[in-house]
Image (tube, helix red, strand yellow):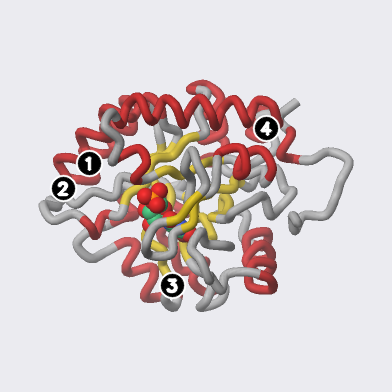
Amino acid sequence: MPLHSPSLTNSAELSFLKRASLTRHPLTQRLFQLMERKQTNLSVALDVTSQTQLLELADALGPQLCVLKTHVDLLEDYTPDFGHKLQMLADKHQFLIFEDRKFADIGQTSSLQYAKGIYRIAEWAHLINAHIVPGPGIIDGLKQIGAPKQRGLLLIAEMSSAGTTAKGAYTRKTVQLAEEHADFVIGFISLRKLSDQPNFLHFTPGVKLKKGKDSLGQRYRTVEEIVGENQSDIIIVGRDITHAVNPQEQAITYRQAAWETLSRRCR
Ligand code: 5BU
């Protein structure tokens, strides 16, 4: 059951352009607009260990994506120009970069992890995410760094893995914190739509063309289930695209399936 209360207009039925007009967050506006322009609500998780391969995939898949998701700490050949190179591809193909760092420490430490260290994530990632386990201080800490750069934060309200403890009261608390920090929080990682506020975007990982699971607890749902029934906005697809014989063709298949499902949902 969705957590949002029933209302006359369901925000999930509004077009992205309409939702862009209903938000004041500049990054959310930009994302809604580029999704509408490119006609895509596909995000790809490039979980590769080579920076060269990541940049090649980003260039090849860029036209199909609204958001490119990274785990920068997987890279074995990371060099400090990585962020700049990825940003050039983001400009070329018009997508946003989401570093799936899952911050989870006190505000002070998280802000340092975001701004400093080897990766300097705040310099190149438009979007980051965080667990709310530490309480609202983590949002304030990340916001100090990200807000002046017009970055955005996704709160992890639910996870795709089996046995996740991010559910029930925890999920509801996450939604409440997002609503209280809507100047920096742009949405959620969740399995379904959680808030009826049209400015919030819902991103869902654990997607395949057929339902299933991997050997380490990942659970896969279909595009129809996620974007149609559960009313999430953006699908995040990893291995089913990156490990495909032809990742470009596979990305096109997902992009079309997700956009068609969304188009049926929106009035
Ligand atoms: P996959 O190859 O499609 O299973 O990759 C899914 C990606 O999404 C991978 O990068 C995970 O780290 C990420 N992910 C996830 O699978 N589930 C979650 O709940 C969150 C992130 Br949060």
The local secondary structure at tag 1 comes to helix
Q: Nearer the viewer, residue 227 or 177?
A: 227
Residue highlighted by disc 1: 54
Quadrant position of the C terminus in the picture: top right
Q: From the viewer's perspective, is the residue at label 4 or at label 1 nearer?
A: 1
For label 2, being within 8 Å of ligand 1 is answered no
Amino acid residing under circle 2: Ser
Amino acid residing under circle 1: Leu
The numbered mark, 4 or 1, whose residue comes first in the sequence reads: 4
- Is the C-beta separation of discs 1 and 2 under 8 Å? yes
Residue highlighted by disc 3: 104
Q: How far apart are marks 3 and 4 (CA)?
A: 32 Å
> Tag 2: Cα neighbours inside 10 Å, few (<14), some, or many (≥20)?
some
- Is the C-beta separation of discs 3 and 4 under 8 Å? no
Q: Residue 156 carries which label?
A: none
For label 4, being within 8 Å of ligand 1 is answered no
Instruction: From the viewer's perspective, tell me whether residue 5 is left or right of residue 149.
Output: right
Q: How far apart are marks 2 and 4 (CA)?
A: 39 Å
Could you say where residue 125 lies in the image, as x and y percent from the top left?
35, 48
Amino acid residing under circle 3: Ala
The numbered mark, 3 or 1, whose residue comes first in the sequence reads: 1
Quadrant position of the N terminus in the picture: bottom right
Residue highlighted by disc 4: 21
Residue highlighted by disc 2: 50
Amino acid residing under circle 4: Ser
Q: Can residue 115 be seen in this view?
A: yes
Q: Which residue lies furthest to the right in this view?
A: 8
Q: Can residue 143 be seen in this view?
A: no
- Is the C-beta separation of discs 2 and 4 under 8 Å? no
The local secondary structure at tag 3 comes to loop
